Amino acid sequence: TFGWSRRPCYGVFLWLLSCLVPALGQDAPDEARPFRLVAQQVVEEECPALALPALNFWMQLQDHFFEAQYQYFSPERERKFIALISGIECLNMLMRNLDTAYLCPLLAAKQFKMVAEWASALSHPW
Protein backbone atom coordinates (compact mmCIF):
# COMPACT_ATOMS: atom_id res chain seq x y z
CA THR A 1 0.00 0.00 0.00
CA PHE A 2 3.11 2.25 0.16
CA GLY A 3 1.66 4.28 3.02
CA TRP A 4 -1.04 5.94 0.96
CA SER A 5 -4.07 6.95 2.91
CA ARG A 6 -7.66 7.08 1.76
CA ARG A 7 -8.02 10.46 3.48
CA PRO A 8 -8.02 13.31 0.98
CA CYS A 9 -5.09 15.71 0.87
CA TYR A 10 -6.30 18.87 2.58
CA GLY A 11 -3.47 20.94 1.10
CA VAL A 12 -5.04 20.39 -2.30
CA PHE A 13 -8.43 21.46 -0.93
CA LEU A 14 -6.92 24.63 0.50
CA TRP A 15 -5.40 25.41 -2.88
CA LEU A 16 -8.72 24.73 -4.62
CA LEU A 17 -10.48 26.88 -2.08
CA SER A 18 -8.17 29.79 -2.77
CA CYS A 19 -8.99 29.46 -6.48
CA LEU A 20 -12.75 28.99 -6.12
CA VAL A 21 -13.71 31.26 -3.23
CA PRO A 22 -12.52 34.88 -3.13
CA ALA A 23 -10.65 35.81 0.03
CA LEU A 24 -12.62 37.34 2.85
CA GLY A 25 -12.07 41.06 3.03
CA GLN A 26 -11.61 41.43 -0.72
CA ASP A 27 -14.42 42.95 -2.67
CA ALA A 28 -15.39 41.36 -5.98
CA PRO A 29 -17.47 42.91 -8.74
CA ASP A 30 -21.23 42.49 -8.34
CA GLU A 31 -21.49 40.13 -11.31
CA ALA A 32 -19.03 37.79 -9.56
CA ARG A 33 -21.18 37.80 -6.39
CA PRO A 34 -24.46 36.07 -7.27
CA PHE A 35 -25.63 35.91 -3.64
CA ARG A 36 -25.01 39.56 -2.72
CA LEU A 37 -28.64 40.69 -2.91
CA VAL A 38 -29.97 37.70 -0.99
CA ALA A 39 -27.23 38.15 1.62
CA GLN A 40 -28.26 41.77 2.07
CA GLN A 41 -31.92 40.80 2.50
CA VAL A 42 -31.10 38.09 5.07
CA VAL A 43 -28.86 40.37 7.11
CA GLU A 44 -31.32 43.25 7.08
CA GLU A 45 -34.12 40.91 8.18
CA GLU A 46 -32.16 39.11 10.91
CA CYS A 47 -30.35 42.20 12.23
CA PRO A 48 -32.46 45.28 11.41
CA ALA A 49 -30.64 47.91 13.51
CA LEU A 50 -27.06 47.48 12.31
CA ALA A 51 -24.88 50.49 11.58
CA LEU A 52 -23.37 50.69 8.09
CA PRO A 53 -19.90 49.24 8.88
CA ALA A 54 -21.42 46.27 10.72
CA LEU A 55 -24.04 45.83 8.00
CA ASN A 56 -21.34 45.69 5.30
CA PHE A 57 -19.32 43.17 7.32
CA TRP A 58 -22.32 40.91 7.85
CA MET A 59 -23.44 41.20 4.21
CA GLN A 60 -19.99 40.15 3.00
CA LEU A 61 -19.83 37.31 5.51
CA GLN A 62 -23.33 36.06 4.64
CA ASP A 63 -22.42 36.22 0.96
CA HIS A 64 -19.44 33.94 1.60
CA PHE A 65 -21.62 31.57 3.62
CA PHE A 66 -24.04 31.31 0.71
CA GLU A 67 -21.10 30.51 -1.59
CA ALA A 68 -20.03 27.81 0.86
CA GLN A 69 -23.58 26.38 0.91
CA TYR A 70 -23.56 26.31 -2.89
CA GLN A 71 -20.34 24.26 -2.75
CA TYR A 72 -21.61 21.98 0.02
CA PHE A 73 -24.79 20.98 -1.77
CA SER A 74 -23.00 20.09 -4.97
CA PRO A 75 -22.96 16.34 -5.78
CA GLU A 76 -19.14 16.09 -5.65
CA ARG A 77 -17.74 15.05 -2.27
CA GLU A 78 -14.57 17.14 -2.71
CA ARG A 79 -16.68 20.28 -2.91
CA LYS A 80 -18.22 19.44 0.46
CA PHE A 81 -14.75 19.62 2.00
CA ILE A 82 -14.10 22.90 0.17
CA ALA A 83 -17.35 24.23 1.62
CA LEU A 84 -16.35 23.10 5.10
CA ILE A 85 -12.99 24.85 4.83
CA SER A 86 -14.70 27.97 3.52
CA GLY A 87 -17.21 27.87 6.37
CA ILE A 88 -14.42 27.52 8.91
CA GLU A 89 -12.62 30.50 7.38
CA CYS A 90 -15.84 32.51 7.63
CA LEU A 91 -16.16 31.55 11.30
CA ASN A 92 -12.54 32.57 11.80
CA MET A 93 -13.34 36.00 10.34
CA LEU A 94 -16.35 36.20 12.65
CA MET A 95 -14.21 35.34 15.68
CA ARG A 96 -11.69 38.04 14.74
CA ASN A 97 -14.52 40.60 14.77
CA LEU A 98 -16.36 39.69 17.96
CA ASP A 99 -17.65 43.22 18.52
CA THR A 100 -19.54 42.97 15.21
CA ALA A 101 -20.52 39.35 15.83
CA TYR A 102 -22.26 40.30 19.08
CA LEU A 103 -24.41 42.81 17.20
CA CYS A 104 -26.19 39.94 15.45
CA PRO A 105 -26.00 36.87 17.71
CA LEU A 106 -28.81 34.96 16.00
CA LEU A 107 -27.10 34.98 12.62
CA ALA A 108 -23.76 34.11 14.23
CA ALA A 109 -25.32 31.12 16.00
CA LYS A 110 -26.87 29.91 12.74
CA GLN A 111 -23.49 30.04 11.01
CA PHE A 112 -21.72 28.12 13.79
CA LYS A 113 -24.47 25.49 13.79
CA MET A 114 -24.32 25.07 10.02
CA VAL A 115 -20.54 24.57 9.92
CA ALA A 116 -20.68 22.18 12.89
CA GLU A 117 -23.33 20.10 11.12
CA TRP A 118 -21.21 19.97 7.97
CA ALA A 119 -18.14 18.85 9.92
CA SER A 120 -20.20 16.17 11.65
CA ALA A 121 -21.75 14.97 8.39
CA LEU A 122 -18.34 14.69 6.79
CA SER A 123 -16.96 12.87 9.86
CA HIS A 124 -14.28 15.50 10.14
CA PRO A 125 -12.61 16.32 13.45
CA TRP A 126 -12.61 20.11 12.85
Image (cartoon, grey):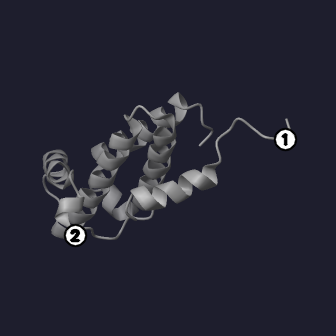
Quadrant where the N terminus sits is: top right
Q: Position of residue 58 (x, y in %)?
A: 26, 58
Say which residue appears at 59% left-offset and 53% top-offset: 12
Q: Position of residue 124 (x, y in %)?
A: 60, 36
Q: Is residue 107 left or right of residue 85?
A: left
Alpha carbon separation for disc pair 2 and 1: 50 Å
Q: Position of residue 118 (x, y in %)?
A: 47, 35
Nearest the camera: 24 or 30?
Answer: 30
Quadrant where the C terminus sits is: top right
Q: Amino acid at mark 2?
A: Pro
Q: Which residue is mark 2?
A: 53
Say which residue appears at 18% left-offset and 46% top-offset: 42
The secondary element bearing badge 1 is classed as loop
Q: Amino acid at mark 1?
A: Gly
> Which of the marked residues, 2 or 1, is nearer the chain's N terminus?
1
Say which residue appears at 39% left-offset and 57% top-offset: 21
**On screen, 103 above or below 125?**
below
* Residue 92 visible, this orientation: no
Residue 57: image quadrant is bottom left
Q: Which residue is mark 1?
A: 3
Nearest the camera: 14 or 38?
Answer: 14
Q: Nearer the viewer, mark 2 or mark 1?
A: 1
Q: Is residue 113 left or right of residue 15?
A: left
Q: Is residue 18 left or right of residue 36?
A: right
* Residue 110 visible, this orientation: yes
Within 10 Å of the Cα at label 2, are there few (<14), some (14-19), or many (20+) other Cα atoms?
few
Q: Position of residue 119 (x, y in %)?
A: 52, 36
Say which residue appears at 27% left-offset and 60% top-offset: 60
**On screen, 52 above or below 90?**
below
